[in-house]
Amino acid sequence: MRYLLPYICLALFLLSGGWNVTFGQEISDAELEDLIEILVEDSDDNVDYDTYLERLTYFNNNPINLNKSSAEDLYNLGLLTPLQVGSLIYYREYVGKLINIYELQAIPNWDLATIRKVLPFVRVKGGIDDFNVKGGQLLWGGKHQLFMRYSRVLEEQKGYTAADTLDDGSLSNRYLGSQDKLYMRYKYGYGRKISYGFTAEKDAGEEFFKGSQSQGFDFYSAHLYLSDVGPFSQIIVGDYEMRLGQGLTVWNSLGFGKSAYVMNVKRQGSPIRAYTSVHEINFLRGIAASANLTDKISVTAFGSIKPVDVNVVAVDTLTDEIISISAINEFGAHRTESELNTKGAVSQSDVGAHIRYETRRVGLGATVAYNKYDKPIFRSDSPYNRFRFSGDSNLNYSIDYRLLVGNLHFFGETAFSSFGGMATLNGVLASLHPTIDVSIVQRHYERNYEAPYSNAFAESSTILNESGLFFGAEVRPKKGWTLRAYFDLYDHPWLRFRTDAPSTGSDKLIQLDYKPSRSLVAYVRFKSETKGQNAANNSSPLDFLTPSTKTSFRVNLKYKVNKNITMKSRVELSWFDDEVNPQEKGFMAYQEFSYKPLSFPLSFDIRYMLFDTDSYNTRIYTYEKDVLYFFSIPAYFDQGRRYYITARYKLMRGVDVWLRFAQTTFYNRETIGGGLEEINGSTRSDVKLQVRFKF
Amino acid sequence: MTKSMRFFRDSLVILAFFNEYDHKYAFSMRRLLIIILLSCMGSAGLFAGTGEPVNDARSTALGGSSLFYSGPFSSFQNAANLALLPKMAVGLNVGNKFQLGEIRNYSLGFALPTRSGTFALGIFQEGIPAFKESRIALAYGRMLTEDLYFGVDFDLLNINIENHGSTSAFTFGLGLNYKISKNIVMAAHVFNPLNSSWTSAETDRVPAIIRLGAQYKPSEKVSVQLEVEKNNQFSAQFKGGIWYEVLENFQVGGGISTSPSAFHFGFQFEAKEFSIGMANMYHPTLGHSPQLTLVYAGVDKNKKK
């Protein structure tokens, strides 16, 4: 209590109107866009970022009540560190409910930047969850949203041209469907009490209501989610995501890893969440439920069965039945005969359970997850696969913990796989001073550990064959200034794809942010990563590793000229050096103009960009403003220009239309893309139309 | 030190393993690997070498960043910090690089504040009789204004190669610290700005080193510092770390350094006038480099008053 006394005094002072700070409710696009952009640069392209944006947009429309929210609710935002969540709950316990949103400044570890970041998503009173609603109202009286999206590449790609006749008389491979991409989604929600909806998608090249796709779309997903029903705190039927522990066993949802947001290294959030995206593999399909046995103990169980695409290695010559597979194919496209032949060819079943003990200071959890394929996996006999999982079933079990001691927040998980491997992750978040935060994460994943839905903090996208130590710090030495830096040293004790020897690596980032006011946001960032990988252009009979270093330097500026106009500028340089071949360089610069009037239904963003890189190694990622809930963070390489315009028009109340046109022209290419995606020309144009109905 | 001399030194270290200097060590692949890597990675700055800052345990824990260290070893690091020293201090430091006895180092430091500034003396030695480097530094530091400190160090460097003779060089360093705000101090140190020579050969020059850094110290309990070091013979190196007082007499620190990439960790315990510090640098391939520092600081007369 003594610890809180100064804060209580500050709270009283603030509430008495002694200090006026302007709080706006405007959603901070820059923070979100930047966070997601950083993630893409460091991880796989197939992570579900649009769901994350959608979730934040949801919280913007349905803010969390800070007086009622549990730690889990707060974690779900993904914007607060465990120390900040712990401080809020502690504050509530000892001071009582927050009276006003201004009181947030009195909570320890909540600095002004954090408050500004979360403000669009939180409230301290009122709201839809406070009412007792009747069944009919709950089922239909909430918010409905229907999205319809159409997109396509305007230039003809090779997969859509007439097939060639091959030497043996057969026809060459071509896509069966049209070049159009279609997407439809309906979602209903009443606060956080209920949600249901469906999603459907047809990728470019897939058939639609004909041939192989007699049911219309290639991919369908649906769910019904309820909270606080009978004994269950959460229950879902249909497609869902599970998020348990630190992601060593099951975490098939977005999880932040290495980024400039160095305190965002701990997995946290409610265990069950509806799946509304279109990644065709990384979700669970069936039923999941969570129940609170006491106010400190909860249990969660889930079961799932779904078909998955595979890479086939052996087929019964008599029956054509698949005998074994080499891997699960996560691409999710079914455009050609061969892609259709392996569509949903194997059934994957998953069951699991999680028990959790939670107090403010301590959290302990135990997870068990079992998965089975109806055909065994036998990977290729490449040396890097030597210790990978093979067989048709795998059992994973783990324990996870969190512990709050003073200003230190410890967390971790240790997991085992019945295949033999062990994985452990341990970390600490520390607030050493109101202006200094530190994070440390240690991990050790054995080369024979395997869990199909693992997504933990790591350098690699697969959680195995890696040991490392991460050290991150965030310092706010002066108002408006933030320095973030991380340093990660890791090693892979066994071979990896295109890395034919055990290897080591290091990853460093330092970023200085300057936000003197709400209208100006600027930062400079330096990032360098060195990792061992097979030397390129190697003419010797043996592969050997070289320490390959990719370095980038970025200057970014965002300035809000007035209420309607925002300017964004960026210059980025990159270098790649593998100590064997000549150094490669890259450059990119863009200018963006955003017009978003408050009293006029039309708003738009225009960007013009030039890029010039020596190779793919020096590619540069940039976030692009796209239609709502669609994320576009392409990487650019070679030489060319790009521009796009994304416009939004509020047609009438509840009906919004987005139109986007983007075009890239390369100066040093005569074709774009490869295989069936190839365009015979130097220009690629994309058009996208989206309509949203809200009622 | 020229590349040829460095290669010669490394070769001697290798020979030491197979000859009379290393009967006590059994041959192992790990040791061989370390030796080969050390030989190949001279250019990566793993050998501090004569002329590099000689760090105490706390500076090692902070990633090797020592621009803001004030103590008996300041003569090796940045003499400007001597201006902040309130009392006499004497210290002993032992570092065991990569746990190899052949490149173990010892240093002794002494600093004495006077009315006209603080004087300091440091003695450093590294290596075995086959190859030995030593350094003697005499330094002086004082305040110019309340926010500006200045220091100068004069250094005598020596390399001794058994059966080949020895060579010495004389040089100096200049340091400057300046407060830009209540919590932020900037520092700069230049070592051997005139590029003294070891021998009459034009190429045998002592490295010139420039270090620039900043320290943010929002309270007496915690500080963060970052520095960049450029040695004209090596790649630029970034070093930084955080130092935190866990208990009244017990502090811990952690840091990083680049080129080569390494983690650092350490702690310090204080008991009356004595303090003992331990630190370790971890390099993923070469392993651990533990270090121990003992300091005796005299009674702070100003404090008594």
Image (cartoon, coloured by chain):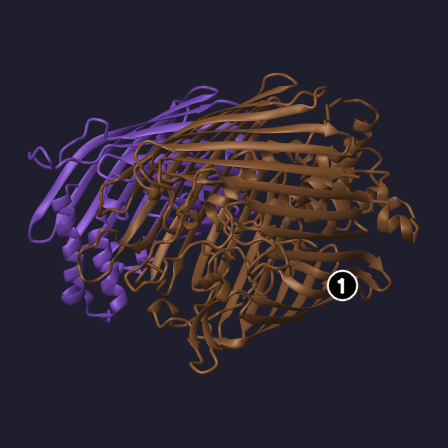
Is A688 displayed left or right of A682 in the figure?
right
- Where, by quadrant of the figure, is residue B111 drawn? top left
- Quadrant holding the N terminus of chain B: top left
Measured from the top left, where is residue B285 in percent x and y? 32, 58
The residue sitting at 31% across, 48% down in the picture is: A548
Residue B259 percent location from the top left of the image: 32, 44
Residue that label 1 marks = A290
Q: Secondary structure at mark 1?
A: strand
Chain A rendering hue: brown
Is residue A559 visible in the rendered image? The answer is: yes
Identify the residue at horizontal 36%, vertical 67% (top origin). Answer: A384
Which residue occupies the foreground of this view, A44 or A98? A44
Mark 1 residue type: Ser
Q: Residue at x 49, y 72 (%)?
A: A421
- Image point (23%, 32%), residue name: B208
Picture coordinates of residue A665, whole percent (x, y): 39, 32
Give the purple chain's letter: B
Q: Is residue B141 left or right of residue A30?
A: left
Give how far across and how far down residue A539 sits, in percent.
18, 55
